[in-house]
Image: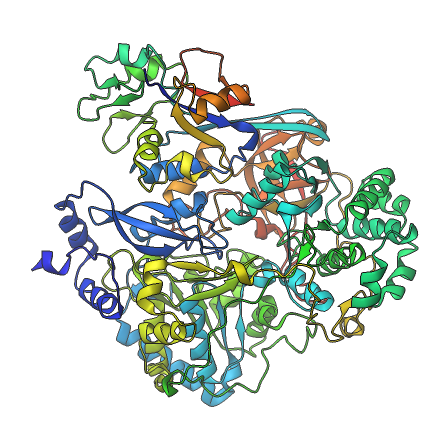
Amino acid sequence: MLDAKLSRRGFLAGAAGAAAAVGASGYLSFGAWEKAHADEADDEPRFAGHSACGGCYSKCAYSAYVKNGRLGKIVGDKDHAFGVGKPCARGYGWSQMAYSANRLTDPLKRTEDGDFEVISWDQAYQEIGDKIKEIIATSGPQALSLVETGSVSMDFYVQRLFTALGCANMYRHGVACNLARNSGLLQSIGTGDFGADYANAKAVMFIGRSFADGIRPAYVAEVKAARDNGAYLIMVDPRYNSSMGFCDEWLPINPGTDLAFILAMAHVVVRDGLEDKEFIESDTVGFDIWAESLKQYTPEWAEKITGIAAADIERLAKLLAENAPAASIDSGWRAVTGCSYINSGETARAIAAFNGLLGCWNKPGGAILFPAAPAFGKLEDPRFAAPPAVKDKKLGAKEYPVSLYSMVSANFLMEQIQEGNVRGIVFCQSNMVGGYSNPKVLEEILTSAELSVDIEVQMTDTARCCKYVLPDTSFLERDDLPWSFAYAVPCLTLRSQVVDVLHPNTRPVHQIAKELAEACGVGQYFDFTLDELAEAQLNTLGLTLTEMREKGSISYPDKGVDYGAPIKWGTASGKFQFANDDMTKVGLTPDVNWIEPLVMPSGDEFRLIGGKQPIHSQSWTTDNPELIQITHDYDLTRIWMNAARAAELGIADGDEVEVYNDLNTGKVRVKVTERLNPTCIWMPSGYGCNSPDLTNAYGVGLSFMSFVPFQRDPYYGATMSQEALVKVRKVGA
Amino acid sequence: MTRYGMLINAKDCIGCYTCRVSCQRQNDLVPTEAFIRFLDSESGAYPRVKTEVLPVQCMHCKDAPCAKACPTGATYVTDGGIVRVDQGKCIGCKYCMAVCPYGARVVNESTGTVDKCRLCAADLTENGTPNCSCVSACLTGCRMVGDLDDPESEIAKAVLDLNARPLTGDPNAAIYYVR
């Protein structure tokens, strides 16, 4: 009987099989599953379907192989535009997530003393549903909120639930990621992201972005191709990062001053008349305004601020201009342009504008605007019709009118909860407390919220602050909706369930959203199965679900960037915008000008800067046994300190030190290095988990954000993660 | 005679640990059991710095000292020159660990036996089996596997072209590095 239910799942060709497998496995405990599978014996791993990594948001696709009922090897799927057939370390480590000893296995409710008690799904839905209905009845649906980032079906289902409830307050992690960058770019080029034709470039400048640390496999391959093809690669970063092996030159800029550096390079280009006049004439607005402003930003001015010699600024500006249009400044991501400084958004605009001077947009070797993702057609079946559109805008949209709407500040939302304007919050796979801003403040706000729910796979710092925690299945144990996206080429990909559900009382997020909807009285919008929706979506592209499960990923190389074709700019003016009057709504000038960082180190202070290590996705992966073992083996929680500064402080390599400021004090070992600008301390940004249930991550390393105030930049509301100063002293000295 | 070996172009190694974890998946290893470790170094003075990451694993030595030291014959050498450990025969005495010049051997915490790089990529590549060996998984493609003794093989040519050498100049080692 047991064996029958546990029969190896096999490759599921269609909808019925997937549903049956989820249902059948629901009868077994983890112990029974382990015991049953111990008796099986596969000689060779068996292909179990295409999954897609859950270790970061690139969701790189891979083929999963199961041996003796357990996921073993994974082999990357080449047609995935981000993964290109090469999962990174996180992908291999995170593929074992289903087997984590620290999984959430049952619905939980927080008790008065802060512990959790197991409750039934029925009780959870009843209590949460009743509270949501009460909040809507007394305060309206805008007193609710959602913070989620995750899988495709998660996005679809929980957003649909909130739309059905009439609530517009849906937020993501952009506030602590690339909110300022994407918003700044939106105001310049009409879209929140751009790339580069790295492989054909003659020169590329990276500003605070390291493809070998914040890995997306496609980028690693491209930067290597650029190097192999002879491109001159320049790295502007306070830290000699892991991408330096591919780069020709390191400029250890004073952190927070990148904007001055770019403005001075732009000054040189315009002063010497090296800009692409034809592009500026045909495609842009506001050049004259910016050209006038640029007169003040001389290389000599910038040298004093940035620490980069005026001669180098002159040389590099000319180098990029001479190699244009096969040259560009890379768009950055989180660091520098994303959310780090008060001037991050303006730095993003400056990068776009500098590329505007180069006239390199959609030219071979230049900056590229991504093609459109494959678009699903209209679904005829009325069951899939969207709930009535919500008329309200999300809270914060009014205060941050030039922000990308999808990324409006989640820190602003938390302030609304603090002030009692929002009474209920639901999280999905978003460890806000662990990284969006100061954890202590976020924890205080969240624990005081009237209703807080987290749909999660592990007890994150956020989950432990919530009243209800609902256990999702891991990404390996459930099917997902097809994901349509575009990088250099459009791509369509589908994650399928590849292992049985291990913990019988976990439920896939799409089921949880649907059941919550029923409990809230809006279940009528979910009268379909995930497979029916996936099938309908794929049919509009001439594909079937069966076909897509077999293929996993499809790329569309013939629909990639059309180099040299006229560009349809998505801005208000329909042109590339060197200047934009909308910026004045948040107190900025129409064109990009210098803005001082919020804080600057003096005396024995250091600016605290951070960054990713290639083995972790912020706090998300630090409980993974394979990945945290690397942290231990290589002592990767160490802060980095410049050797000369360390000598001044009497600190030697490997010493234990205390890092401190008004907000936090913590002990950690130090790596004394020549690879860092002396004005800053570099701290890896994902450690310092404060949730005891995550036994592998708990207490390992320092929490970066604990040293950063609960704050927002005045223009976009980003978290300003590197506007913080610390001091360091040797322990026992 | 066939002699399998590997070439690692350390100039392309970004120290991302992908090979370590992919190897754990390919070979069903426990989290603490890593067949590949990394020697990280920096030289120069700020701001003129250079760094190097060297992935190190079993060198599949000719005349392997570990095989000689093994009291049970658990460590053996295949016809292709690959040094392997028969886990069923290993008694966990760790003599092999003591004599390995490269510190390339590790204890499997769950079994107590000793293991190390199996040069699995040689068989997998030859058989065309889909895999996540270090050679397949490397994000920059810095690894190559093949028959060092066949002058026509891709690896033998690359060793010459790129002036690859064993890590310490040890002629017994079958892992060649470009640095």
Question: Is residue A521 at least partly visible in the picture?
Answer: no
Residue A367 or residue A567, whichever sits in front:
A567
Q: Please indicate whether residue A492 sits to the left or right of residue A419 in the image.
A: left
**Quick one: A554 or A318, which is closer to the camera?**
A554
Taking the spot 19% from the left edge, 15% from the top edge, the residue there is: B72
Residue A357 picture quarter: bottom right
Residue A428 visible:
yes
Seen as rendered, the residue at the extreme left is: A1
Residue A359 position within the rendered picture, expressed as x and y whole percent measured from the top left: 77, 57
Residue at 46%, 79% in the rendered image:
A162
Residue A527 figure quarter: bottom left
Q: Is residue A570 left or right of residue B110?
A: right
Q: Quadrant of the C terminus of chain A?
A: top right
Color theme of the render? rainbow
Looking at the image, which residue is at 69% across and 75% down?
A401
Name the image quarter holding the N terminus of chain A.
bottom left
Q: Is residue A561 above or below residue A602?
A: below
Count of residue discs: 0
Up-down relation of residue A25 to residue A606 (above or below): below
Q: Position of residue B84 (x, y in %)?
A: 28, 22
Q: Is residue A597 left or right of residue A570?
A: right
Q: Which sits in the foreground, A64 or A524? A: A64
Residue B162 spot, x, y in % from top left: 55, 22
Residue B160's place in the image compared with A486, above or below, is: above
How far across and down, in percent of the image, does residue A216 sit? 52, 49
